[in-house]
Amino acid sequence: MVLRSWAGYAAVTAADAYPRHLLQTVRPKLAALEGFRGLYLLRHHGQQEVEFRVLTLWESMDSIRAFAGNQPDLAVVEPEAKATLLRYDHKVRHYEILAAP
């Protein structure tokens, strides 16, 4: 199993928009993809901005490529998500899961 990690940053005053978009619009699309195994959405409140860390779980790098294309290390960020964020990581990191509960 592979974990895909990405972060986006929102204004403190608009911190509810991104989670709403991810959970209501993006998660159902991901759930329909073969090889998708779930996601975690983490939030860290800073003084100037709110960081969202999105961790998605995938069966394999092949399933990630089916989602992200031939350059799986590039972030996939919908225009609606971009509109809710001040900035975001343009690259993602992938981790092989060696142990899990």
Image (cartoon, helix red, strand yellow):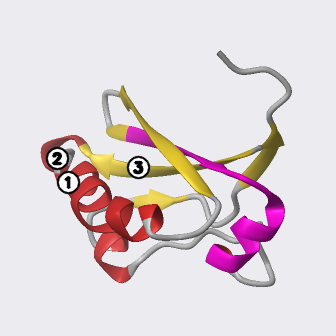
**Nearer to us: label 2 or label 3:** 2
* Residue depicted at 13% across the width and 45% down the height: 13
- The amino acid type found where label 2 is placed reads Asp
Q: Quadrant of the C terminus?
A: top right
The N terminus - image quarter:
top right
- Indicate which disc residue 9 carries: 3
Q: Nearer the viewer, mark 2 or mark 1?
A: 1
In this rendering, the answer to whether 29 lies above or below 13 is below
Say the numbered circle drawn on residue 20.
Answer: 1
Which residue lies at the image location 39% right of the left edge and 71% below the top edge? 29
Mark 3 or 1, which is nearer the eye?
A: 1
Please state the extent of the stretch shown in magenta in the rendering. 51-67
Q: Earlier in the sequence, mark 2 or mark 3?
A: 3
Q: In the image, residue 27 lies at what x, y percent?
A: 37, 59
Residue indicated by mark 2: 16
Query: Is 53 a magenta residue?
Result: yes
Say which element carries label 3.
strand
Find the distance from the CA under tag 2 to the CA under tag 3.
12 Å
Q: Are marks 2 and 1 in contact (CB under 8 Å)?
A: yes
Residue 94 percent location from the top left of the image: 78, 49
How far is disc 3 from disc 1 in space, using C-alphas? Answer: 14 Å
Residue 79, horizontal then vertical, whole percent? 36, 81
Using the image as rendered, state which of residue 5 and residue 37 is in the foreground: 37
The residue located at (81%, 69%) in the rendering is 62
Mark 3 vs 1, N-terminal side: 3
The reply to whether dot 2 and dot 3 touch (C-beta < 8 Å) is: no
Which amino acid type is shown beneath numbered disc 1?
Answer: Arg
Question: Is the residue marked by circle 2 packed among few (<14), some (14-19), or many (20+) residues within 10 Å?
Answer: few
Location of residue 40 with respect to 91 vertically, above or below: above
